[in-house]
Amino acid sequence: MTSALEIPAAGVVLDADVAVPPDASGVVAFAHGSGSGRFSPRNRYVAAELRRAGLATVLADLLTAEEERDDRLRFAIDLLAVRVIALTDWLARHEPMSGLSLGLFGASTGAAAALIAAAARPSEVVAVVSRGGRPDLAGEYLRLVDQPTLLLVGERDPEVLALNRTAAKRVRGDCRLEIVPGATHLFEEPGGLEEVARLAREWFLTHL
């Protein structure tokens, strides 16, 4: 069952959908980016697959409704990262998820925010997955990321693939780049999103 919650985060309140399956073995928080939010059909699909595998999920809007109207904020990596860090801190205190290992799933610019949060909270964040993300925007924080990190990129997304290849070399911890065959940036091709969900599920089940 999914609950709609309001989560205090760095001076604002974020709307979130939280679901905790019985006997959850971990929790995955989603960091959306560049205009996306908790209603993203792609992230909601991945979240549903993670719950089927026994993982709790948290889909939170990182921007308020008013902030969403300012296109510049969708690419404000520092602001998004502060919100993900605050979300991480909230999860560490909130029952029934406070005792669960935490993973972060970032998409687009949200991937950079997730990686910065992982660098800032090495004891709380256990693993990271990026879908079609821009980990390069995490900059020097990449060298502080020790957590197992999976970068998922479509084969037919050459610019983002090149950026992910460079970023993968800068992550200090175990970092794997997986190229989804035939997929473009949004993984809209048949089987593309299913492969993303499968790879993310295996990564989180292995590390959480």
Image (tube, rainbow, N blue to C red):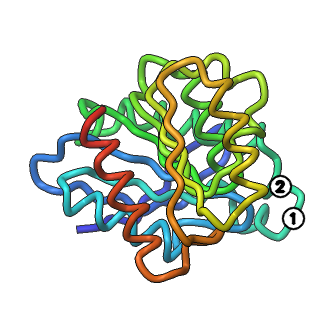
Q: Is residue 123 above or below residue 96?
A: above
Locate residue 131 relative to residue 82 in the image: left or right: left
Q: Residue beneath label 1, please?
A: 70
Would you say the residues marked 1 and 2 are in contact, meaning their CB atoms lie under 8 Å apart?
A: yes
Q: Name the residue at 68% across, 43% down.
A: 164
Element at badge 2? Answer: helix
The residue located at (83%, 55%) in the rendering is: 73
Instruction: List x then y, in percent, for residue 199.
Output: 37, 53
Q: Amino acid at mark 1?
A: Asp
Residue at horizontal 87 percent and vertical 64 percent from the top: 70
Kind of residue at disc 2: Leu
Q: Which mark is residue 73?
A: 2
Q: Quadrant of the N terminus?
A: bottom left
Rendered position, 74 above or below 191:
above
Q: Residue at x 65, y 27 (%)?
A: 169
Q: Of the numbered discs in the image, which one, if any, rests on residue 10?
A: none
Q: Name the element at disc 1.
A: loop
* Residue projecting furthest to the bottom: 190
Is disc 2 surrounded by few (<14), some (14 to 19) or many (20+) residues within 10 Å? some
Within 10 Å of disc 1 (Cα), the crowding (few <14, some 14-19, many 20+) is few
Residue 121 location (% of width, % of height): 52, 22
Q: Quadrant of the C terminus?
A: top left
